[in-house]
Image (tube, rainbow, N blue to C red):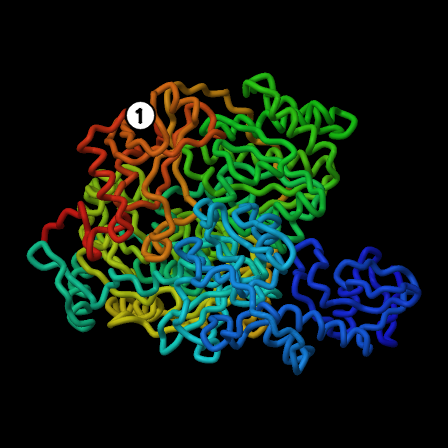
Amino acid sequence: MVSVTIDGQTLEVEAGSTVLMAAERLGIDIPTFCYWKRLPPLASCRMCLVEIEGLRRLQPACATTVTDGMVVRANTPLIEETRSSMLDMLLANHPLDCPICDKGGECELQDMVMAYGPRKSEFHDLKRVFHSEDIRLSPVVIMNVNRCIQCQRCVRMCEEVVGAVALGTVEKGMDTAVTGFEGSLASCDQCGNCIEVCPVGALMSFPYRYKARPWDLVETDTVCPHCGTGCQLTVGTRKGELMRVRSKWDEGVNRETLCVRGRFGLDFVSGRDRIERPMIRRNGALAPVSWDEAGDYLRRRLSAVEDKAAGGLASPRLPNEVLYQFQKLMRTVFRTNNIDCSSRWSAPFDTLGPLLAAFYSRAPLEEVIANDCVLVVGGNVTEENPITEYLLRDGARRRQTALLMLSARPSRLEADACVVVRVSPGGETASLAAVVAGLVEAAGHALLGETFADIEATIGRSQVNTGGDGPGRLASALKESRSVTVLVSVELLRSPEARATLQQLNNLLQVLRLLRKGLAMQFLFDRANQLGAWDMGVLPAALPGLWAVTDDVNRATLARSWGAEIPSEPGAGLDVMLELCVGGGMGALYLAGADPLISYPDRDFVTRALGAADLLIVQDTFLTDTAGLAEVVLPAAGYGEESGTFTNNEGRTQKIRKFREPAFEARGNLAIFDFVASLRSQTLQPSTEGGIFDEIARLVPAYQGLTQDGLGADGAFTKALPQPPDGEFFAPSPAAKTAGGFMLITGNCLFHNGYLSERSEILNTVADDPYVEMSAQDAAQLGFSDSDPVVVRSALGELTAKLKVNKRFPKGLVFLPENYRALRLNRLMRRGVYPCPVEIHQATTSAARLTGSASNPKDRHQGIDGGLPDAPSRPD
């Protein structure tokens, strides 16, 4: 610690702190323009100059490191005169168009001039003018370079934090101008973080431009619904209409940053295909009815099918309170444990539960990735969890964190990694086993003690053959680190080998624990409340709190609280429920916010299964493909139309707040559950959002002690689950697999991650057309060029999309984003087979025209005018 005195106040600060940091702790205001907490100091604006005893010249507070005994004066006549002069020079060329500038009312230059500026300018020359009209750099970013004050926050944010390097400067001195490559931002992430950090109106949001003033807006702090990172959002509305989204620099895991989906993708709340009224199927078609008519019809139909099995599927994008109440409804009213929360994969609870209990770190991501070494397994963090990527890049560049990557699909973050291991699609399991074997071999008996022989015998390291030294390099890096964080992409759960992958992950974590490494593990979820859905017990074999359904003690505790018996046998996941439908054994299948017809592998099978259920009930906000098959459709409030909580990847529970009223005749999800329960002469208590949260905090161990008032701006962290006894090494190494030909994997892309984002007009504007991605080597061998239309064909079907050549892709890998509805990607996928073997062919002229028709941003994600393409009608 070192001591510093500023304006007569003395403070001890950590070595390496700047004068500006010390002044902030003392509550002394020092103005800045170019300084930003997330960025290295630039010291170009000269607004933060201070006097330091013993130095002749004024020094920039943002870039001057405190030394022991330093004496600083931050407010003297000389400093005041200097600040005034700096502002006078900025105003010399700054256009005085505040009345029409979007930044008016929240402009830092306006604030600075009011506080420190001159009352009269000494400059009388004509103002410099770069362009007479604003330049639209991208569909979402528009620039007025005349207003730029050359702080370069935007350029540094783009390069240092986002990693896109889409902005730069040209010329020098007072002629310096910020611009994109050839006047556009075609290759950027379109995240708008440059707009967020711009202190003036030089960079503006085109969708928000000229729509409102800050004082017109009602602002609501909430949480992003697009992925599991859980970014803080501030939504601005006027008369209930969404105007803009911004972030706050001092709140949430994201602080001031957002990705393109969070900043520009919330206009889905006004999507065209809202379900306006309840509907029931009459004469093969859905017909709007009143809520009373829907209730009468549903009561009769529920009575008719109550002798058969029932099942439920809920979306992990719904709030905790809704998910908790849904599983309670299914278990107590429908008397079934046939419950699931994913329409893309089934979580193997027998492996997942112990992993979450023993190793999951419910702690701030910034703290978790401060370990010496971070291993990212699977997926593409750049496109699935962009804000997590920003934090990982910051750790690698500023804290020298050793970043290790193991995946089939490359990502931009690899440029900052120490070790990158590319595996064949589905090869993560064998590679993890090889890493474990390498660690055990390197550690030996001396470090692992008496368990060495048992571990070596169980893992069967001689079976491991990954065809390279990559796992060995990962093992060496992990062994040399004192503390390790493992971040696991949820995409690994798509594979039929998910259980084996989790077992090898468990082996790795147990070895690291035996080696006394500081250890942390978190999943990188692509759905906003996936961890919350698991915690709430929306699983066939797990109760709230991830207690096994077969646990008599905890099941009895819940039963007493709920006043109803809970079935004791584990239920069926979605795949088995669909099999039940096909076999004629499913009575009522209840879907809340889920669309398996577009997301579950094998569209034809899902169509048959949903059509074979005696009673298909869909409760949703939008008219999805699955809703087109339903017998009863119930319009539910969407995001922003009801309050609740999300639990993000960190285990942080955050408040999502209502910022508009439900559209048309939609009702809140909780109200609809009460409505359905009443049809069977039962009630769900408590039934309000607040009461349910209190019950969760009382009955779910990880949430005990939480209160809604205690969530605050940054939320509150749930507790680690009660740990079972340390397990033994139960997973031998898998035999290595070799696959020939092209293997298709799927997942999210930067501009879309399904369901909600594909209903955003703005995201549809910035997103690429539907595409298939493959390596430059494969494209050359096939004679294809970038943007050529190609046909992707599997054993089940084919589709046409434009080719996107990626030089970093490994040979044999094909990637298709899952978020383009017009492609209906799941037509190609076979249940239980992933990755999917495919062939790639040149598209015919007619197929190429078909691809072009799917590229219209208004219809490539959904049928024209919200229609339901390929949704066969159900019989009465």
Query: Which residue is the site of mark 1?
Result: 840
Is residue 711 at all visible to an observer of this figure?
A: no
Residue 177: x and y in percent read: 56, 55
Helix, strand or loop for disc 1:
strand
Is residue 88 at all visible to an observer of this figure?
A: yes
Q: Residue at x 64, y 43 (%)?
A: 485
- Left or right: residue 815 compared with residue 178: left
Q: Nearer the viewer, residue 487 or 815?
A: 815
Q: Nearer the viewer, residue 104 or 805?
A: 104
- Rendered-image quadrant of the N terminus: bottom right
Q: Residue at x 39, y 68 (%)?
A: 640
Residue 279: x and y in percent read: 17, 63
Q: Is residue 34 above or below residue 113?
A: above
- Left or right: residue 357 compared with residue 612: right
Q: Is residue 645 above or below residue 355?
A: below
Residue 97: x and y in percent read: 49, 74
As shown in the figure, which amino acid type bears the numbered disc 1?
A: Ile
Residue 210: x and y in percent read: 40, 71
Q: Residue at x 47, y 60 (%)?
A: 131
Q: Quadrant of residue 835?
A: top left
Q: Residue at x 62, y 65 (%)?
A: 250
Name the outermost residue toward the left: 283
